[in-house]
Image: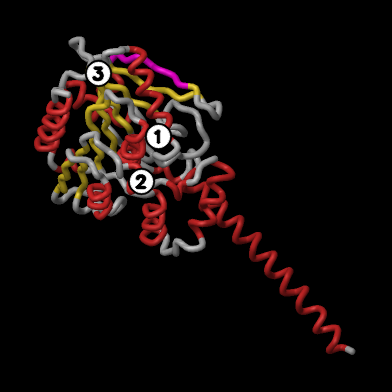
Amino acid sequence: MNQVKQKRVWPRVLVVLLAVLLVIGGLAMYYLFNFAFQRGGFASQQAKNVNTEFYDQTPSQTWTQKTKDGLTLKAHYFAAQQPTNKTVVVVHGYGSSARKMSSYIKMFHNDGYNVLAPDNRSFGDSQGRYVGYGWLDRTDLANWMKQINEYNPRAEIGMFGVSMGASAVMYTLPLAPKNVKFAIADCGYSSIDAELAYELKTMFKMPSFPILPLASIYSKVLAKYDFQKANTKQTLKNNQIPLFIIHGDEDQFVPTRFAYQNYRNDKGEHKEIWIVKGAGHAQARSVNPDEYQQRTQEFAERWFNATQ
């Protein structure tokens, strides 16, 4: 009789234990998701002690955009000292903001261009609870460029991004208006999934499975997008906009292999790649400032001035 009772009890115990483990696992996964995706999470620990002097001291206009999901986004427009139709969109990275892109804004502004620097959703002055990792931001960037064209119907546009901003630029290219003349992507990843897998392995010593498939579910439910769809293999396969890829050969945050993947994924005729010796993540400009300035300036001038 006792043996029969024990046989009946054990399945119930196993079910309860399994349920407890699933709850604990779900809570742990929810914590990890928020740590990586939520405003004020891991992103808030990045891009500290950045020189913002130019941004703070240079007059600018604040532009706004209302997204389909009800967010108010902000961007900051720095008009060139001499009137020009040429505008460069400068896109910040993970944990950064338009203000923290001050030195890059200054670089293009000094070259004689208007500069539009958006705060991506969940960063800077823009609303948003969850990071878009460039994929959710691509529609926002396309809409900022529409605003440039409304502001100046004769506009010519260049795109520039660093880290997550570089990926955002490459994800946006299929949506770019016809007057986008070039794109520069400094240390961007090819896919969000691959970048998160790399971070899980190197920072947390954790496997990508089953964490990333579960994180994808959280992303769809909470952040309203599927990060596993983001890949330059798709967004660059029909690209014809000139693309300049920059990456440091000592990048330990977004590994250099992504630069080569992005270069191979771009099927356009006009593409360049520059691997900067001795540069870590987003350090290409600080490691080799003169050549960085020269190369980006020449690339922008060439395609802004190219005959169509």
Q: Is residue 201 found left or right of 110 in the rendered image?
A: right
Q: Which residue is mark 2?
A: 234
In the rendered structure, which amino acid carries the disc numbered 1? Answer: Arg
Q: Between marks 1 and 2, how big is the CA–CA gap?
A: 14 Å
Residues marked 1 and 3 touching at CB (< 8 Å): no
Q: Which residue is mark 3?
A: 114
Q: Residues within 10 Å of mark 2 (few under 14, many from 20)?
A: some
Q: Position of residue 162 (x, y in %)?
A: 28, 38
Q: Position of residue 152 (x, y in %)?
A: 30, 12
- Quarter of the N terminus within the rendering: bottom right
Q: Nearer the viewer, residue 190 or 279?
A: 190
Q: Between marks 1 and 3, how big is the CA–CA gap?
A: 21 Å
Q: Between marks 2 and 3, how big is the CA–CA gap?
A: 30 Å
Which residue shows up at 36% across the image and 57% down it?
198
In the rendered structure, which amino acid carries the disc numbered 3? Answer: Asn
Q: Is residue 180 found left or right of 271 in the rendered image?
A: right
In the rendered structure, which amino acid carries the disc numbered 2? Answer: Gln
| Label 1 element class | helix
Q: Nearer the viewer, mark 2 or mark 3?
A: 2
Of the numbered discs 2 and 3, the one sitting upstream in the chain is 3
Q: Residues within 10 Å of mark 1 (few under 14, many from 20)?
A: many
Q: Position of residue 158 (x, y in %)?
A: 25, 27
Q: Which residue is mark 1?
A: 138
| Label 3 element class | strand
Q: Nearer the viewer, mark 1 or mark 2?
A: 2
Of the numbered discs 1 and 2, the one sitting upstream in the chain is 1
Which residue shows up at 40% across the image and 34% down it?
138
Q: Nearer the viewer, mark 1 or mark 3?
A: 1
Q: Is residue 280 magenta?
A: no
Of the numbered discs 1 and 3, the one sitting upstream in the chain is 3
Which stretch is magenta? 58-65
Residues marked 1 and 2 touching at CB (< 8 Å): no
